[in-house]
Amino acid sequence: MKYSSIMAVTGLPGLFELITSRNDGAILRSLEENKTQFVSNRIHKFSSLESIEIYTVNDNVNLVDIFHAMEKSPETLPDLKDNNSVKKYFEKTFSEMDFEKVYASDMKKIVKWYEILKKQNVEIVLSETPEETSEIN
């Protein structure tokens, strides 16, 4: 499974592997449940993880950069029930993050996604420079 085929879908928890796309949506496989389903693009928006950027105090960075910093960090992953511990984790792991624009809910999502990717042994690398980017807000 390639990182480039991993999607986040609005309104649905977790991450999905894109199996195939259609005019009215996509066939996706849940990474957590290993269940394949059709998801309509009339109801949901799809974001490739490769295209997601995170606000920093300087230029925005790709989500891959955050994941790489998490891999290299000696810090243990935070308790997701405690917003303060999540923020402190990222202050130590990726201090350039703009903590006024990146909310605790976004940081929790990043940690959850990282855990899912690690559990599935997905190599976190960009296939090439993404043409379109979207931001977590």
Image (cartoon, rainbow, N blue to C red):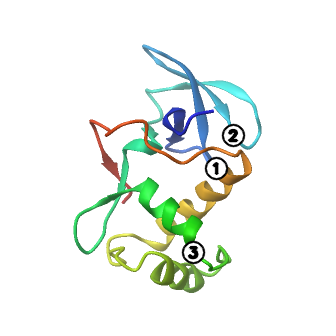
Compared to residue 88, the image places residue 27 above or below, namely: above
Q: Which mark is residue 31?
A: 2
Compared to residue 129, the image places residue 74 above or below, namely: below
Which residue appears at 70% of the width and 26% of the height? 36
Residue at the disc numbered 1: 117
Q: Residues within 10 Å of mark 3 (few under 14, many from 20)?
A: some
Viewer-side label of 2, 1: 1
Viewer-side label of 3, 1: 3
Tell me residue 60's x, y (percent): 27, 61
Which residue appears at 59% of the width and 54% of the height? 113
As drawn, is 128 to the left or to the right of 21?
A: left
Tell me residue 72's x, y (percent): 56, 69
Which residue appears at 31% of the width and 65% of the height? 55
Instruction: Report the Cα–Cα distance between label 2 and label 3.
Output: 24 Å
* Residue 28, image quadrant: top right
Residue at the disc numbered 3: 73
Query: Is the Cβ of the residue at disc 2 closer than 8 Å to that at disc 1?
Result: yes
- Mark 3 residue type: Ser
Viewer-side label of 2, 3: 3
- Mark 1 residue type: Leu
Quadrant where the C terminus lies?
A: bottom left
Compared to residue 79, the image places residue 36 above or below, namely: above
